[in-house]
Image: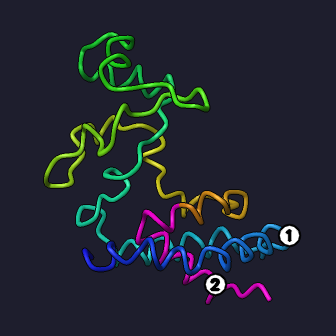
Amino acid sequence: MEEFLKSLPQLAAQKKKENQVYFKKLKKKAPKNLDGLMQDLHDETFEEVDCLSCANCCKTTGPLFTHKDIDRIAKHFRMKPSDFIDQFLRIDEDKDYVLQKVPCHFLGADNYCSIYDVRPKACREYPHTDRRKIYQIGNLTVKNTFICPATFKIVEKMKASIPMN
């Protein structure tokens, strides 16, 4: 996994244009069975990829925190939401709450998340490859191929399974 992770940014960069074109075509004419196919590819790939051996998403990017996330996590720590924000979050250029720094403060050396049961919605849904109507988030999916080995593999399997000529 470590070797693949090292080469992932270069591999994703090589495929970026191709992937962007693919998702553009997919958006114009998505097959009727796309959601089911994506769920199958997602499940199959996550049988091969162990997030705990990677955690690249937690090491290199930070999730958005909704107000519900902040309230839930602050309650978990028995803190006021405002104190949680002051200690861990900042507001980014899009006016969203994000981590003050990466890697994520809640990521342990063993790649386990110390707040897994109350983690943000963005973390629970990442990398969004089992989302319905994935063609609507093509740009995000292409971006995630640079970070997540599973996303890279899923997109490659998509292109092989659902050719968009």
Magenta range is: 144-165
Left or right? Give the position of 28 relative to 92: right
Choose between 114 and 90: the one closer to the eye.
90
Residue 56 against residue 112 in the figure, above or below:
below
Q: Residue at x 30, y 42 (%)?
A: 104
Quadrant where the N terminus sits is: bottom left
Q: Hey, what amino acid is under mark 2?
A: Lys
Indicate the quadrant where residue 24 lies: bottom right
**Label 1 CA crowd tier, 10 Å (few <14, some 14–19, many 20+):** few
- Dominant SS of magenta comes to helix
Task: Check residue 147 for magenta coloring.
Answer: yes
Q: As displayed, is residue 66 above or below residue 50? A: above
**Left or right: where 12 falls relative to 101:** right
For residue 134, side relative to residue 147 (left or right): right
Q: Is residue 74 magenta?
A: no
Q: Image quadrant of residue 75? A: top left
How many labels were placed on the picture?
2
Residue at which label 2 appears = 159
Q: Considering only vertical position in the picture, is 27 above or below 95? A: below
Residue appearing at x 25%, y 74% in the figure: 2
For residue 28, which numbered disc appears in the image? 1
Label 2 and label 1: CA atoms lie apart by 15 Å
Amino acid residing under circle 1? Lys
Identity of the residue drawn at 36% across and 38% down: 119
Residue 30 location, x and y as percent?
79, 72
Left or right of 104 on screen, residue 127: right
For image coordinates 49% across by 69% down, the residue present is 151
Q: Earlier in the sequence, mark 2 or mark 1?
A: 1
State the image coordinates of residue 69 (x, y, percent, origin top left).
44, 28
